[in-house]
Image (cartoon, rainbow, N blue to C red):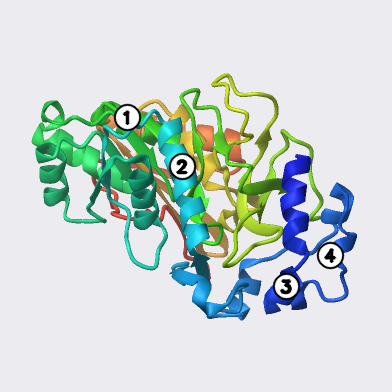
Amino acid sequence: MNIAPEQFELIKEQFKTLKERSEFYARKFEGIDLSDVQTQEDFEKLPFSEKDDLRKVYPLGLQAVPDEEIVRIHSSSGTTGTPVIIPYTQQDVTDWAIQFARCYEMAGITNLDRIQITPGYGLWTAGIGFQLGAERLGAMAIPMGPGNTEKQLRMMEDLQSTVLCATSSYALLLAEAIAEKGLRDKLHLRKGVIGSERWGDKMRNRIADELGVELYDIYGLTEIYGPGIGISCDEHSGMHIWDDYVYCEIIDPKTGKNVPDGESGELVLTTLRKQGAPLIRYRTHDLTRIIPGECACGSHHPRIDILIGRTDDMVKVKGVNMFPAQIEEVIKFTDGASSEYQVMIDHLFGKDIITVFFETTATGDDKKRVEEELAFIFKGKIGCTPVAKGVAIGELPRSEKKTQRIFDNRY
């Protein structure tokens, strides 16, 4: 995707003082005169930023404004190493709220809605981002946070929540609890805004059917504001990205070169207005593509496709590369398999063994048929044959946050 003239003006305005304001970029762009960046080609020669770069300047090495302008910090989870701390100015917080309110509007949510927010609060950007957008929109925010499913359902019923914000894992857990308690007819839910992890069509359809809602995928990451920089529309054909705040590139993850619109690769983001911690050519490691052409919904904002996965999600088994999205495709096409699955990869007796556990209502010979069908489809779509094991609905773990589905026990 080419940089639009108005996007380039914002980038060049930022470049005028970026190295003076930011020790991080003074080092990152050492020897580079940013005033020489005048074309798309010039911009694409700039080095990428990586999460590891951000970790190295922990805690506040990314900060690009004086302390008195910082009103808040957020942080990545730090589960895989040193956390990344992102400082925000008041304008950053306002800009994030504007983008998030747009997301709600794109999903047909109004100030008459009651928005039940189940993602976590605190250093994580999720809960507070959903709340910021709701308040900007003028809707009623119900800031539950995660867990305590009994209380979630009581508030949902008593306060007549119309919108559920959740991870797909927790939305499924709630949907199953609602079905088990026979509460659906007592609820007023009409929309679901789901983010933070990728999910397959079977899971999506199951949640939508059991809750009786229309679901929207929301996108974001802590380093770039948080959730709310993009969302799917009523056409459900990709996610619109707010390109007046963020510029998108898709690169080949191996070569780092930009690929044409429509080709899959790694999403790279540049903030256009961020003050506290601007990011230039930040590698998200999310795999997607820019969808060419205009969306039928009429929005002029560009679209990225639903995420395939992450470059670091890939596992290699028996010489074959595989991503969670491919496994979800197998589940989708296996008649009799429900949405939940778990993959165990082991190395036994000198060879790799992949076992796919999946939920099904089938029993006896029917279950055996579903297992054989799943293994056959897996071999055809991914290229290796797993051990397929059907288990009863509800037997695989449920999560209030993100669900880990692939366990590589070889290392």
Q: Which residue is mark 3?
A: 25
What is the three-letter code of the residue carrying label 4?
Answer: Leu
Q: Which residue is mark 2?
A: 218
Label 2 sits on a secondary structure element that is strand
Q: Is residue 19 left or right of residue 57?
A: right
Tell me which numbered mark, 3 or 2, is placed earlier along the sequence: 3
Q: Residue at x 68, y 75 (%)?
A: 22
Q: Which residue is mark 4?
A: 34
Q: From the viewer's perspective, is residue 266 above or below residue 262?
A: below
What is the three-letter code of the residue carrying label 3?
Answer: Tyr
Tell me which numbered mark, 2 or 4, is placed earlier along the sequence: 4
For disc 3, the neighbor class at 10 Å (few under 14, some 14 to 19, many from 20) is many
For disc 4, the neighbor class at 10 Å (few under 14, some 14 to 19, many from 20) is some
Tell me which numbered mark, 3 or 4, is placed earlier along the sequence: 3
Mark 1 and mark 3: Cα distance apart in space: 45 Å
Mark 2 and mark 4: Cα distance apart in space: 33 Å
Q: Which residue is mark 1?
A: 208
Mark 3 and mark 2: Cα distance apart in space: 30 Å
- The spot of residue 182 in percent (x, y) is 10, 31
